[in-house]
């Protein structure tokens, strides 16, 4: 591995119909939404492991018992962990805090275009002494957050799922005397427009000669 001293944590829900990619269910149905969720989790794990970057931990919700997580564990040599805490912020802090002292990145499972180069930037920022690194999302949230020593103040009082998540997190960091290193913005897949964007990227990858000008 390139950075065996670091960790990459992937947050993922169990692919239970009706509980994942719920914003897309009215448009594509529960089954397709569940299959899309599985595709995105596998895509993220492929990105991490093909880049041979760092040990990967799959943080599961509501627990680690779903057969899909067992498949991921065996296929990608990912250790399984159960998300713990009330609310997303508490769960994220808990996961990062379990790796205290280790350069650790945490990402979600719905960032289809994240790649090894992007993750390397995050890890190297921490290895070079940055306290926190954040990958902004185009919708005002973030797709990646990383640190050596987590501080629960950055995760408390944040309005998750809204377009002020990044701004609120940066403000809380500044109140703690920290200026996070910001990476380039990426987009996450939440709605029908995002899905169409992802499908177009996949078509262009499979059939390069059919790529359209934008």
Image (cartoon, grey):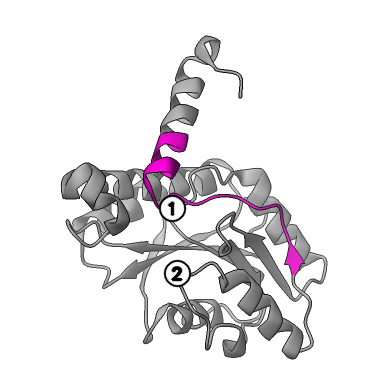
Q: Which of 47/154 is in front?
A: 154
Query: Sequence order check: which comes first, mark 1 or mark 2?
Result: 1
Give the extent of the magenta segment.
Answer: 181-198
Residue 121 in view in this figure: yes
Q: In this view, does 197 lie to the left or right of 64?
A: right
> What's the distance in space between the residues labelled 1 and 2, CA to CA?
13 Å
Residue 2 in view in this figure: no
Q: In which quarter of the image is residue 146?
A: bottom right
The quarter in which the C terminus is drawn is: top right
Q: Where is residue 152 in the image (x, y as percent from the top left)?
A: 57, 88
Q: Residue placed at 49% from the left, 52% from the top?
A: 188
Q: Does the magenta stretch include residue 195?
A: yes
Q: Residue placed at 47% from the left, 36% from the top?
A: 197
Dot 1: within a 10 Å radius of its alpha carbon, few (fewer than 14), some, or many (20 or more) residues? many
Residue wearing tag 2: 161
Q: In this view, does 144 lie to the left or right of 177?
A: left
Q: In this view, does 149 lie to the left or right of 164?
A: right
Marks 1 and 2 in Cβ contact (< 8 Å): no
Q: Residue placed at 77% from the left, 82% from the top?
A: 178
Residue wearing tag 1: 110
């Amino acid at each position: 591995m390139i950075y065996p001293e670091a960790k990459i944590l992937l947050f993922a829900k169990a692919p239970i119909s009706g509980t994942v990619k719920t914003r897309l269910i009215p448009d594509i149905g529960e089954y397709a939404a569940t299959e899309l969720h599985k595709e995105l989790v596998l895509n993220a794990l492929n990105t991490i492991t093909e880049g041979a970057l760092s040990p990967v931990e799959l943080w599961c919700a509501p627990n680690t018992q779903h057969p899909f997580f067992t498949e991921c564990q065996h296929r990608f040599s990912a250790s399984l962990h159960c998300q713990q805490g009330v609310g997303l912020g508490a769960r994220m802090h808990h996961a990062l805090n379990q790796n205290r002292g280790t350069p650790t990145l945490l990402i979600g499972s719905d960032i289809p275009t994240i790649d090894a180069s992007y993750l390397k930037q995050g890890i190297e920022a921490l290895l070079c002494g940055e306290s926190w690194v954040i990958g902004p999302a185009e919708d005002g949230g973030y797709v990646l957050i990383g640190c050596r020593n987590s501080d629960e103040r950055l995760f408390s009082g944040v309005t998750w799922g809204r377009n002020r998540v990044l701004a609120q997190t940066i403000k809380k960091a500044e109140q703690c005397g920290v200026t996070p290193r910001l990476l380039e913005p990426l987009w996450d897949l939440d709605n029908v427009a995002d899905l169409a964007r992802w499908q177009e990227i996949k078509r262009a990858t499979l059939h390069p000669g059919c790529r359209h000008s934008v």
